Image (tube, rainbow, N blue to C red):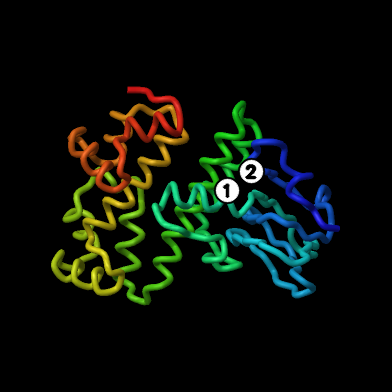
Amino acid sequence: MRLLYKNVFSQNQEFHFQYHKGLSDFIGEHSHDFCEMFIVTKGQVLHYIDDVQEVLQQGDVVFIQNGRHKYEKTEAYEVEYINIAFSRDTFKKYADLMFGEHIDVSDFNAKNWLTPQTTALIRRKGLWVMRASRPEAEIKVLFLDLLIKLECKKLSVKSGNALVNEILAKLKNTGHFAMNLSEIIGQTNYSYEHAARVFKNETGQTLTDFFNEQKITYAKNLLAFSDTSVIEISNLCGFSNLSYFYKLFKEYTGSTPGTFKKMNGNIIL
């Protein structure tokens, strides 16, 4: 069976979302002319792509771009998984929006994985989408959240340095955005100067640039897909000085937070 974008997606629909509890509603082996992202949120399942079998476990994320694929139940486990389908153009639109550079779905590994804590969070968000009164907006937020986590993980995988990976994890944690860099690096038991030098050598970015980039990416997500006010977003991103937030945001995006929100949602000041 081959699924076609024009038959699956309605007019102006960007994402097709399903939360599956088991395989009873799976359509069987198929291919398609659009992309899919599968996130196993619970249990385990057998996955076949062009007759090549692999076992997917809780936390695994799979990108399907082409080829025939299907699922089969394992003897020992039930499975729950999220399926988000989208076109390449939709992927490019939001990747460009969030990262300001061209990132294609093919840039991601066919199989990725999330930590148990992140998987549990994504599962809760997926179940919330099923109950949401505005599922389209919630699906976008979930998709972008996954995209940001996978992009940060991709950067982490590129580095074999344990210190750099520890720093990356801390700097992309939104709970640390209100802290200054000295406090965050102090948690690593290395001097700031040593950590900054190693980080720059491994990633090509300074600590400040990377941290600000994470904050602005998070701000763009909130501005585009939530009703949170600009002032509150500034505080959530660790900027107590609203003027500095405006300055930095424009430096990274080319527009002010207000203009960005007006172009992508309803502005609330």
Q: Is 123 left, or right, of 181 in this rendering?
A: right
**Relative depth, front residue between 70 and 76:** 70
Residue at the (20%, 68%) spot, across then down: 195
Residue at the (33%, 75%) spot, across then down: 161
At numbered mark 1, what does the secondary structure look like: helix, strand or loop? Answer: helix
Marks 1 and 2 in Cβ contact (< 8 Å): yes
The spot of residue 110 in percent (x, y) is 60, 67
According to the image, label 1 marks what residue?
Answer: 90
**Relative depth, front residue between 150 and 123:** 150
At numbered mark 2, what does the secondary structure look like: helix, strand or loop? Answer: loop
According to the image, label 2 marks what residue?
Answer: 15
Residue at the (26%, 64%) spot, across then down: 205
Earlier in the chain: of badge 1 and badge 2, it is 2
On-image quarter of the C terminus? top left
* Residue type, mark 2 in image: Phe
* Residue type, mark 1 in image: Thr
The spot of residue 93 in percent (x, y) is 51, 48
On-image quarter of the N terminus? bottom right
The spot of residue 125 in percent (x, y) is 56, 41
